[in-house]
Image (cartoon, rainbow, N blue to C red):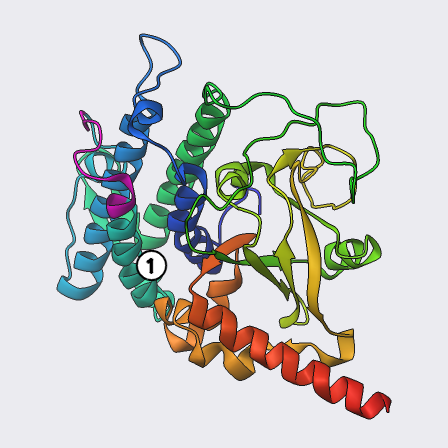
């Protein structure tokens, strides 16, 4: 949706509900040195920019909840939406992001139940006059999306880790050559850590592209670089296909991340070419007619319980998600069950 257009209540709720995950995706794996990075002396640090967005979101959520639950009718909107003098993060980054996500979920849960009268409830601001709750949410959405773009741009400028250098991509299963850079990012070794479990949310067309490549390669979007960097050989990955809202396959990651801009997968953004890639090997694959409907098992997943039951589909927005081992097993068992039935019927 274009933020230049007037947002509907549903648009505002959708954008505001997506902010915690967008932040989490962008800042995943940032260490203290990177949080102290600034583009120039007059610019805020990356940590300061993140802290500002989290503080703003928390203040706005408190204002909206008070207006709805307590009848608050007067507030300084500017100090809530764009607070001044927010310092750098004063606690661990993931803890701060998780706390904000919990606050935002409570606010979004309330907003889902608002009718026309509530969206048109007025709050008086000493500078802007009377403003509806919908107008406040529109301002908040624009403010948060603008800062998310800033964070995305700043993380793109971060220096490369010292231990990373250009390496060749393994020949086996490699994608077609392109004229642009292809760089190895990590050793790919598990380094003693337990396997991680991932879910890729894919459009039907993009899943078809992965299938056409024999489930040997998977690309992830530009903004998920740090998540893909953390993947190791032996990690597991499953596919949720939008539209059909079904689970279609599981694979195992077979290489460390590398960069490749060969066009394979597509999205609405013309400049998005899914550059962060890993080699994969197929484990359990289903024909489209046998995909496991998410609605049949979503209630069993710890991951989905972060959202209210009536809005469980929000769990499948975004492109890449980390699951716990139990959730992955529940989904893979259902996929494997359908695969066995498929083989049995085939004779």
Q: Is 158 displayed left or right of 333 in the figure?
A: left
Please name the residue shown 47% across and 64% down the image: 314
Q: Is residue 57 above or below residue 328?
A: above
Which quadrant is home to the C terminus?
bottom right
Which residue bears the numbered disc 1? 120
Q: Is 322 displayed left or right of 261 in the figure?
A: left
Residue 108, picture quadrant: bottom left
Q: Percent from the top left, x then y, of residue 65? A: 21, 59
Please name the residue shown 43% across and 72% down the image: 326
Q: Percent from the top left, x then y, of residue 330? A: 50, 77
Q: Which residues are magenta?
A: 85-96
CA neighbours of label 1 inside 10 A, class few (<14), some (14 to 19), many (20+)? some
Q: Is residue 276 above or below residue 300?
A: above
Q: Nearer the viewer, residue 89 or 124?
A: 89
* Residue 4 seen: no
Q: Nearer the viewer, residue 182 or 290?
A: 182
Q: Secondary structure at mark 1?
A: loop
Q: Is 43 displayed left or right of 216 in the figure?
A: left
Magenta portion: prevailing SS class: loop
Q: Percent from the top left, x then y, of residue 66? A: 16, 58
């Amino acid at each position: 949706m274009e933020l230049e257009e007037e947002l509907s209540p549903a648009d505002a709720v959708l954008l505001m509900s997506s902010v915690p995950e967008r932040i989490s995706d962008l800042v995943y794996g940032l260490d203290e040195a990177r949080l102290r990075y600034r583009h120039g002396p007059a610019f805020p640090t990356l940590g300061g920019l993140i802290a500002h967005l989290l503080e703003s979101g928390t203040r706005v959520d408190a204002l909206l909840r008070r207006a709805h639950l307590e009848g608050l009718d007067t507030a300084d909107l500017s100090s809530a939406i764009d607070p001044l003098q927010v310092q750098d993060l004063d606690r661990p980054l993931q803890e701060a992001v998780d706390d904000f996500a919990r606050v935002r979920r409570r606010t979004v849960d309330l907003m889902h139940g608002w009718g026309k009268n509530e969206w048109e409830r007025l709050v008086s601001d000493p500078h802007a006059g009377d403003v509806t709750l919908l107008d406040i949410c529109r301002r908040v959405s624009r403010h948060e999306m603008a800062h998310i773009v800033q964070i995305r741009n700043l993380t793109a400028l971060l220096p490369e880790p010292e231990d990373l250098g250009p390496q060749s991509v393994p020949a086996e299963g490699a994608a077609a050559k392109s004229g642009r850079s292809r760089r190895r990012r990590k050793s790919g070794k598990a380094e003693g850590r337990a396997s991680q479990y991932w879910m890729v949310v894919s459009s039907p067309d993009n899943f078809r592209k992965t299938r056409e490549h024999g489930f040997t390669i998977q690309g992830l979007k530009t903004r998920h670089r740090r998540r893909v960097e953390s993947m190791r050989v032996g990690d597991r990955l499953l596919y949720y296909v939008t539209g059909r809202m079904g689970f279609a396959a599981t694979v195992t990651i077979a290489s460390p991340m590398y960069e490749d801009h060969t066009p394979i997968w597509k999205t609405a953004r013309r400049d998005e070419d899914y550059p962060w890639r890993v080699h994969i090997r197929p484990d359990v694959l289903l024909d489209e007619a046998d995909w496991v409907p998410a609605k049949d098992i979503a209630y069993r997943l710890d991951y989905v319980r972060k959202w209210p039951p009536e809005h469980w589909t929000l769990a499948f927005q975004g492109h890449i998600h980390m699951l716990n081992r139990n959730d992955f097993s529940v989904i893979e068992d259902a996929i494997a069950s359908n695969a066995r039935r498929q083989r049995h019927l085939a004779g």
